[in-house]
């Protein structure tokens, strides 16, 4: 795209001799931001870059590369830019497929202003997703959990959201150039997305210029990958729990966004850091528990000091011995080596300093909020299916933000096999004491009691409850608490990971026998053919309604554990911290008219 849609040269950069201007909208800026640094834009001959909605001065004799969403506003802006002859030529790249009517508007608008000759190219890039790491993407679609579970949402609105998710997934598959076999549990948003995506792929495969030539780059072989689609309600707790591993902790506590975060420095200023695959420490230690990370930082620091001493010793920087010129040749050689080693040492030191600062800030938060104890006790509750009452109330009256307490209380609800009315009331009282807004707690309680009445009702009255519940709460209820044993088995493996493992292996397994199979390449009738069952070498896992680094880490572990190593990509509608997800539950509680029993306060 930066090479004016010509193939790039061997070094992977665009032709530097051609200077150009890059224009993007906010959404596409977020797509670019984790992928290319400002300093790297220069290598591609990009001299200036602007947001599309800013007023810009004309720059003559220079081509402009536009990368924007295909919206009415953006198209009107492009027509205006072209008719003012802001730039010499316009290379238009839309983040997803531009609709026919908009394309016609573009043509007639530029024709009328006699500027159509300035439009060099129009490309559909199918890039409507944010790639955070090689195996991690987000569709950057906000609040889809609220939208899909909103009791007042009509069919039309639900269809629109499903359509948007399908378009995003279609972009990811078009970029990978693969048509996967799709698996999902029955019912709810997962089935809606899977079936709509299947249809979209079928329709596309019929068109002449289709994007899926056999065997794209992602494929190590001609075997197709499997795409497993889930909905957040499949495993609600993981979106809420506190976690004590480095990657999830940094995200949840410090708010990692688009691979960047800002932390308070000791001197009082804010320092911004990037955490991505170019940081070897982040890649190697993201899945370790926090104390292990602290030890690892210490180890790296000592190793660095040792290497610096070694360089000093060799180049005679510290002996203080007289220099008599006898070993001139040897010394010069050591100096040359030192010069070569220094940049690498400096870089290592920067990485160590960065993680020391991040870990120091984290440690402060952990101590102040007892985050280690939250993570441990929540995990114990999930495994044991309950907690001693005194311990429960002790946590709620102890350290932590209002949000920490609310998250803990919700995990208590989800993990209890049955609701003990008296105990729940004492939890609500403890939350009120801390002035916590309990809307989200009320919402989960409501859903849970619906589930319990579903489980205990006989079949005749069950269908009535289901009708009533689905009218009231959309399609989310059956999945929310599908038994805690489903959530965390004894070996602490997430249910998601366990199911993905079973789907990838493709052996008969009662947990997944009811899962649906869609194969967009197969004729409609011939369902159930054997190649769809696996085993698969490559998998994509997509979570509707918000994902997180806990699930991502768990799937990375799974991929590493497999013999031979499997390739697993994790994607989601948006990546949420525990706080952000509980805020969505709070909104749903308000929409359902469940009054908060606490004082109306902010969440922090």
Image: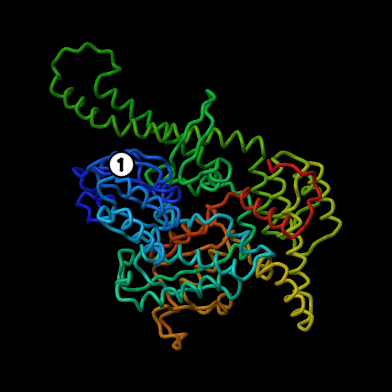
> Which element is circle 1 on?
helix
Indicate left or right for 148 with 502 as reference. Answer: right
Which sits in the foreground, 338 or 211? 211
Q: Quadrant of residue 37?
A: top left
Q: Quadrant of residue 336?
A: top left
Indicate left or right for 377 with 83 as reference. Answer: right
| Residue 428 drawn above or below residue 291 | below
The colour scheme used here is rainbow
Q: Quadrant of residue 432?
A: top right
Which sits in the foreground, 92 or 493? 92
Q: Quadrant of the C terminus?
A: top right
Residue 152 % position (x, y) = 69, 64
| Residue 398 drawn above or below residue 507 | above
* Total residue callouts: 1
Extreme residue toward the bottom, this view: 525
Q: Residues within 10 Å of mark 1 (few under 14, many from 20)?
A: few
Q: Which residue is mark 1?
A: 40
Residue 369 % position (x, y) = 67, 38
Indicate left or right for 493 with 42 as reference. Answer: right
Residue 500 % position (x, y) = 51, 68
Which sits in the foreground, 207 or 492? 207
Residue 477 % position (x, y) = 69, 68
At 45% from the left and 51% from the top, the residue drawn is: 27
| Residue 446 drawn above or below residue 40 | below
């Amino acid at each position: 795209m930066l090479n004016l849609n010509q193939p790039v040269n061997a070094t992977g950069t665009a032709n530097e001799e051609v200077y150009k201007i890059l224009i993007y909208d906010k959404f596409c800026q977020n797509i670019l931001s984790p992928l290319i640094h400002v300093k790297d834009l220069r290598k591609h001959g990009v001299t200036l870059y602007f947001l599309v909605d800013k007023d810009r001065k004309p720059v003559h004799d220079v081509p402009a590369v536009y990368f924007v969403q295909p919206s009415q506003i953006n198209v009107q802006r492009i027509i205006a830019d072209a008719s003012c002859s802001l730039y010499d030529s316009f290379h238009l790249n839309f983040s997803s497929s531009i609709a026919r009517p908009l394309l016609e508007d573009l043509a007639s608008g530029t024709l009328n202003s006699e500027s159509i000759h300035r439009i060099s190219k129009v490309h559909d890039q199918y890039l409507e997703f944010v790639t955070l790491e090689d195996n991690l993407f987000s569709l950057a679609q906000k609040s889809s959990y609220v939208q899909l579970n909103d009791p007042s949402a009509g069919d039309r609105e639900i269809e629109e959201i499903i359509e948007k998710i399908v378009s995003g997934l279609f972009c990811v598959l078009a970029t990978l150039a693969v048509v996967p076999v799709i698996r999902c549990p029955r019912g709810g948003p997962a089935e809606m997305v899977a079936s709509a995506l299947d249809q979209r792929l079928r329709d596309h495969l019929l068109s002449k210029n289709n994007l899926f030539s056999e065997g794209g780059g992602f494929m190590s072989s001609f075997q197709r990958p499997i795409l497993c689609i889930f909905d957040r309600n499949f495993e609600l707790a993981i979106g809420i729990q506190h976690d004590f591993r480095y990657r999830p902790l940094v995200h949840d506590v410090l708010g990692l966004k688009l691979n960047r975060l800002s932390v308070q420095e000791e001197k009082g200023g804010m320092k911004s850091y990037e955490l991505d695959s170019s940081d070897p420490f982040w890649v190697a230690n993201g899945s370790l528990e926090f104390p292990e990370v602290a030890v690892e930082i210490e180890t790296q620091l000592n190793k660095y000091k040792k290497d610096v001493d070694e360089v000093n010793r060799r180049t005679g920087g510290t002996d203080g011995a007289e220099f008599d010129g006898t070993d001139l040749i040897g010394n010069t050689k050591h100096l040359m080596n030192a010069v070569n080693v220094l940049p690498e040492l400096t870089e290592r030191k920067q990485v160590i300093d960065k993680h020391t600062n991040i870990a120091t800030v984290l440690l402060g938060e952990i101590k102040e909020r007892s985050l280690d104890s939250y993570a441990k006790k929540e995990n114990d509750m999930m495994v044991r299916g309950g907690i001693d009452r005194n311990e429960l109330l002790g946590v709620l009256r102890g350290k932590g933000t209002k949000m920490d307490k609310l998250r803990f209380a919700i995990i208590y609800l989800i993990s209890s096999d049955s609701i003990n009315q008296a105990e729940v009331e004492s939890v609500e009282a403890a939350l009120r004491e801390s002035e916590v807004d309990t809307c989200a707690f009320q919402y989960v309680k409501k859903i849970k009691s619906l589930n319990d009445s579903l489980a205990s009702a006989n079949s005749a009255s069950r269908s009535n409850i289901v009708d009533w519940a689905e009218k009231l709460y959309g399609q989310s209820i059956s999945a929310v608490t599908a038994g805690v044993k489903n959530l965390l088995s004894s070996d602490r493996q997430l249910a998601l990971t366990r199911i993905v493992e079973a789907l990838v292996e493709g052996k008969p397994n009662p947990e997944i026998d009811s899962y649906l199979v869609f194969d967009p390449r197969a004729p409609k009738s011939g369902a159930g053919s054997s190649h769809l069952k696996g085993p698969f070498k490559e998998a994509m896992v997509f979570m509707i309604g918000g994902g997180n680094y806990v699930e991502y880490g768990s799937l990375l572990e799974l991929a590493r554990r497999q013999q031979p190593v499997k390739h697993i990509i994790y994607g989601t509608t948006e990546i949420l911290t525990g706080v952000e997800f509980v805020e969505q539950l709070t909104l749903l509680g308000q929409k359902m008219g469940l009054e908060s029993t606490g004082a109306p306060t902010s969440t922090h």
